[in-house]
């Protein structure tokens, strides 16, 4: 049986990368993506600042290490909504599905994230809505 739940090199193309992120066996890989995205956002927005915002990013990085897979997926989707470097990386990993991912990113921004923050959706419901959104995009 082929190994599908392993750590992937940044330069490797991964077909249906967003579907692979859902599988719990890829938790370490997903944790790495989330950690790099948080570091990227901290570098981009809080470079040289020693304030509470940097502390909050560091706290979020620590929480991600202990998060359940579902919670980590929620953080991943929220970061995918705002981090242009993560978007670019995902698009490069799955260039064959560029149009599908672009459509999903539009739905993520205009419907899924807004629905999560404006309704009483649970984290599990948000993650499921994102998974469904990618499947139909």
Image (cartoon, rainbow, N blue to C red):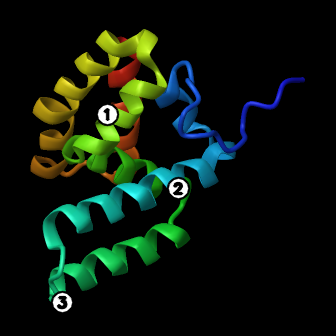
**Label 2 Cα neighbours within 10 Å, binned few <14 / some 14-19 / many ≥20:** some
Identify the residue at horizontal 84%, vertical 24% (top origin). Answer: 2
User: Quarter of the image containing the C terminus?
Assistant: top left
Secondary structure under badge 3? loop
Q: Which residue is mark 2?
A: 32
Instruction: Determine whether the residue tagged by mark 1 lies in a helix, strand or loop.
Output: helix
- Going from N to C along the chain, the mark reached first, 1 or 3, is 3
Residue 85 in view in this figure: yes
Q: Position of residue 77 (x, y in %)?
A: 33, 43
Instruction: Indicate the quadrant where residue 109 lies.
Output: top left
Q: Name the side, left or right, on which 106 lies relative to 11.
A: left
Name above or below for residue 49 compared with residue 27. Answer: below
- Residue 98 percent location from the top left of the image: 34, 14
Question: Residue tagged by mark 1?
Answer: 88
Q: Closer to us: mark 3 or mark 2?
A: 3
In the picture, measured across the screen, residue 103 lies left or right of residue 61, that is left
Q: Which residue is mark 3?
A: 50
Camera sees residue 137: no
Q: Nearer the viewer, residue 80 or 22?
A: 80
Asked if labels 3 and 1 touch by Cβ distance under 8 angstroms, the answer is no
Instruction: State the separation of the CA atoms marked 3 and 2.
Output: 24 Å
Which comes before the other along the chain, label 1 or label 2? 2
The residue that appears at 51% across and 28% down in the rendered structure is: 17
Question: What mark, if any, has residue 39 been given in the picture?
Answer: none
């Amino acid at each position: 049986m082929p190994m599908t739940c392993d750590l992937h090199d940044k330069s490797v193309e991964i077909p249906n990368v967003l579907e692979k992120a859902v599988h719990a066996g890829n938790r370490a890989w997903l944790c790495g993506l989330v950690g790099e995205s948080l570091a990227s956002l901290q570098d981009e927005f809080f470079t040289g600042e020693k304030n509470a915002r940097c502390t909050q990013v560091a706290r979020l990085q620590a929480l991600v290490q202990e998060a359940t897979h579902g919670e980590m997926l929620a953080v991943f989707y929220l970061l995918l909504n705002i981090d242009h470097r993560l978007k670019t990386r995902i698009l490069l990993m799955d260039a064959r599905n560029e149009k599908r991912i672009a459509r999903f990113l539009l739905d993520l921004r205009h419907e899924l994230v807004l629905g999560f923050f404006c309704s009483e959706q649970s984290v599990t419901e948000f993650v499921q809505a994102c998974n469904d959104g990618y499947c139909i995009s």
